[in-house]
């Protein structure tokens, strides 16, 4: 009976992102991007256990049905707007994407058209955007618009030149950044390697942010691996929960300068080690 109850507790922890009693847990934010074009794969992604965060592409055929399904499935799952943005190699830009050749007015209009499609979204991240997220003015415009909402921003980090973090800080926008692209290389071997790299980051930093996509290989892999996280003392948390953790950690550092020094020393050690 005790083993059965233990499994029930762990399943609850896995679903809610709550820490185990008396134990220090690490966290994963798993974002499944690019939802909206395939109903079957989208629904399969929604069926993954835990507080998964789903990036839905605006104006896609299945966007609204999948959004409704996410909201109905689990109170700990959440939606973010997966906003198309101009990339470095993009020859043509989607009509409602954010691009560098738009005036600030058009830029804001396109952003708000997307936001209005998902009134219960909790955040926004960039789809592509290797060019746009490196532009100071456009990121300032973006964060200025998000300042009128309660949304957080997750930087998909499609370029090392992204200035999204500094723009978010300037406008007081809650910010997370992607640590691992799970399936940039869609082979099973590469997915497995990146997944375990994410677990290592989570153990070191306390939390890691994964971006994945709804392919059959990726979904099959996550279906197999997510139930095993409990025994590794790792829980899945949503983007909102990660922001809450971030705020709590910041408050503790402010209240306890000694802890800040210890944390800084730990970060220095990790930097040297890597």
Image: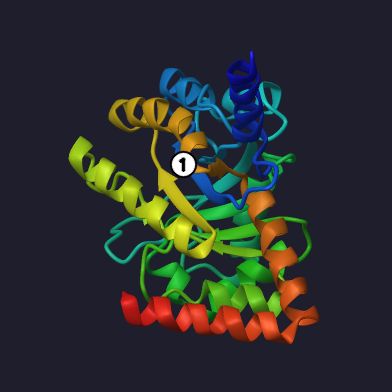
Q: Is residue 178 visible?
A: no
Q: Is residue 232 left or right of residue 24?
A: left
* Residue depicted at x 56% and y 37%: 52
* Residue depicted at x 21% and y 45%: 190
Number of numbered tags placed on the structure image:
1
The one nearer the camera, 215 or 47, is 47
Question: Can you give x and y, in whole percent of width and height, for residue 47 in the image?
Answer: 52, 21
* Residue depicted at x 41% and y 50%: 199
The one nearer the camera, 242 or 19, is 19
Q: Is residue 114 left or right of residue 247?
A: left
Question: Can you give x and y, in whole percent of width and height, for residue 180 in the image?
Answer: 38, 55
Image colouring: rainbow
Q: Is residue 110 left or right of residue 162?
A: right
Q: Quadrant of the C terminus?
A: bottom left
Mark 1 neighbour density, 10 Å: few (under 14) some (14–19) many (20 or more): few
72 is higher (above) or lower (below) than 130:
above
Q: Quadrant of the N terminus?
A: top right
Q: Which structural element holds mark 1?
A: helix
Question: Can you give x and y, in whole percent of width and height, for residue 43 in the image?
Answer: 50, 21
75 is higher (above) or lower (below) than 175:
above
* Residue depicted at x 69% and y 85%: 258
Quarter holding residue 76: top right
Quarter holding residue 225: top left
Outermost residue toward the front in this view: 2
The one nearer the camera, 98 or 47, is 47
Q: Is residue 122 visible?
A: yes
Would you name the residue on which mark 1 appears? 232
The one nearer the camera, 42 or 103, is 42
Outermost residue toward the top in this view: 1
């Amino acid at each position: 009976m005790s083993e059965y109850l233990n499994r029930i507790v762990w399943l609850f922890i896995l679903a809610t992102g709550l820490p185990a009693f008396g134990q220090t847990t690490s966290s994963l934010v798993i974002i499944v991007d690019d939802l909206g074009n395939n109903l079957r794969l989208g629904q399969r992604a929604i069926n993954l256990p835990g507080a998964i965060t789903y990036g839905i592409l605006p104006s896609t055929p299945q966007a609204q049905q999948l959004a409704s399904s996410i909201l109905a499935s689990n109170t700990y799952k959440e939606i973010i707007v997966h906003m198309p943005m101009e990339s470095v190699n993009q020859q043509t830009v989607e009509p409602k994407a954010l691009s560098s050749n738009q005036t600030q007015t058009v830029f804001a209009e396109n952003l708000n058209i997307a936001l209005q499609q998902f009134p219960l979204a909790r955040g926004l991240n960039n789809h592509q955007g290797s060019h746009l997220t490196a532009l100071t003015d456009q990121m300032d415009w973006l964060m200025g618009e998000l300042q009128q909402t309660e949304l957080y921003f997750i930087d998909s980090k499609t370029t090392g030149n992204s200035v999204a973090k500094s723009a978010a800080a300037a406008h007081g926008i809650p910010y997370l950044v992607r640590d691992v692209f799970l399936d940039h290389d869609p082979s099973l071997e590469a997915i497995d390697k990146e997944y375990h790299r994410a677990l290592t980051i989570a153990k070191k930093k306390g939390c890691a942010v994964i971006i994945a996509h709804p392919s059959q290989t990726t979904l099959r892999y996550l279906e197999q691996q997510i139930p095993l996280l409990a025994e590794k003392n790792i829980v899945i948390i949503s983007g909102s929960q990660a922001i809450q953790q971030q705020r709590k950690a910041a408050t503790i550092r402010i209240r306890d300068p000694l802890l800040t020094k210890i944390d800084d020393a730990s970060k220095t050690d990790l930097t040297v080690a890597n």
